[in-house]
Image (cartoon, rainbow, N blue to C red):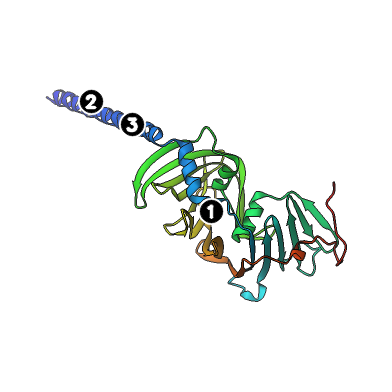
Amino acid sequence: MKNRNTLLNFRRFSLISLALVFVLSNMAMAQKKDIQSVNEGFKPEKVWEKFLEKNRVWIDPQVDTLFYTLNIWNPQKGKEEITTSKLWLSGKKVRWETTAKFGDSNPDNQYKFICLEDIEYCFFPDKIETRSPLLSSVNSFKQGISWYTGIHVLAKNGLPESARIIDLKQTENGEVLILEADTGNKKVRTGLGLICIHFGAYTFPLHHIRLHIRIPDYLPVLEEHFNDKGEKMGQVEFGTEFIDFGEQKAPKILRYVLEGPVFNRKWSLEARFQKINDIWLLKEGFHYTGADIKNQAIVENVSTQAPDPELFEVMEPNSENSEEKPDE
């Protein structure tokens, strides 16, 4: 009798196991079929094209003239150690000045930068250095913060042929499509500040991203970042509020969050934006370590009037009349 019961239990277990395998197999086939259907219904290149059309105002900002001051400080130390930057922009010409200390050779805590067309001039007390400008730097001037992530990399270099749709699901934000794309280990840069001097900055080579896009309005929900080992490095959170720019929209709040097995503690950067004369510009920013605010930034004195052309004249250090020409 005991052997008979054991045999019956074994047969029941076998039948249950076979049924479970059948169910799981069908689920896997259904999921594969769903992904195929998603790819057939949403072509990656078409999704990316529509996404750019809806978000280009902040991904590739077009600004003619602009002036503002950017103040950054550590709330724990108070505003007595505030760092002030001034930014003038006119077409492809940029002038940036800061009170931040830049190396031991700058005892007066003054640093100046002028960008003309495709050349950057960096001014020190005793010399001028020239170099080719970075796209991430150019964009930072127009938006008031260094913010160049995977979306910007794809916008500059194009969507790779290997890009694919990996999921389409219902969420609390509505129907969301997930686009996965390689970014070729291009560097992403975020931080409070504009160029050279940052507070709460992070830079690393990005291998690929997973971009969560809300359908049918093609607005971003989440941008996940991965390294070449497949480890998640962080993510950009877009929130639910967007600023209207006609047929386009721009995020009202951006959050860049780093946490997980790669990092010992949570690090985040939060940027809150405003609309001034059809320009998407930082209003205030916060750099967090855990729940503590390490640095805070605010944009003030904004103007879109054309700056004085003399502001973009390149002079030799300690000279008011002579010009410094770039090396041939």
Mark found first going from the N terminus, 3 or 1: 3
Mark found first going from the N terminus, 3 or 2: 2
Q: Which residue is mark 2?
A: 14
Quarter of the rendering containing residue 24: top left
SS state under label 1? helix
Q: Which residue is mark 1?
A: 57
The answer for how far apart the CA atoms under marks 2 and 1 are is 60 Å
User: Which of label 3 and label 1 is nearer to you?
Assistant: 1
x then y, percent, for residue 203: 62, 50
Q: Which residue is mark 3?
A: 28
5 with respect to 195 (left or right) = left
x then y, percent, for residue 167: 39, 39
Q: Are marks 3 and 1 in contact (CB under 8 Å)?
A: no
Q: Could you tell me which residue is drawn at 53 percent across and 66 percent down? A: 292
Q: Local crowd at mark 1 within 10 Å, few (<14), some, or many (≥20)?
A: many
- In the displayed structure, would residue 27 be above or below residue 211? above
Q: Are marks 2 and 1 in contact (CB under 8 Å)?
A: no
> Which amino acid, by three-letter code, is at mark 3?
Ala
Q: Local crowd at mark 3 within 10 Å, few (<14), some, or many (≥20)?
A: few
- In the displayed structure, would residue 158 be above or below residue 20? below
User: Which of label 2 and label 1 is nearer to you?
Assistant: 1
- Residue 90's disc is none
x then y, percent, for residue 209: 51, 43
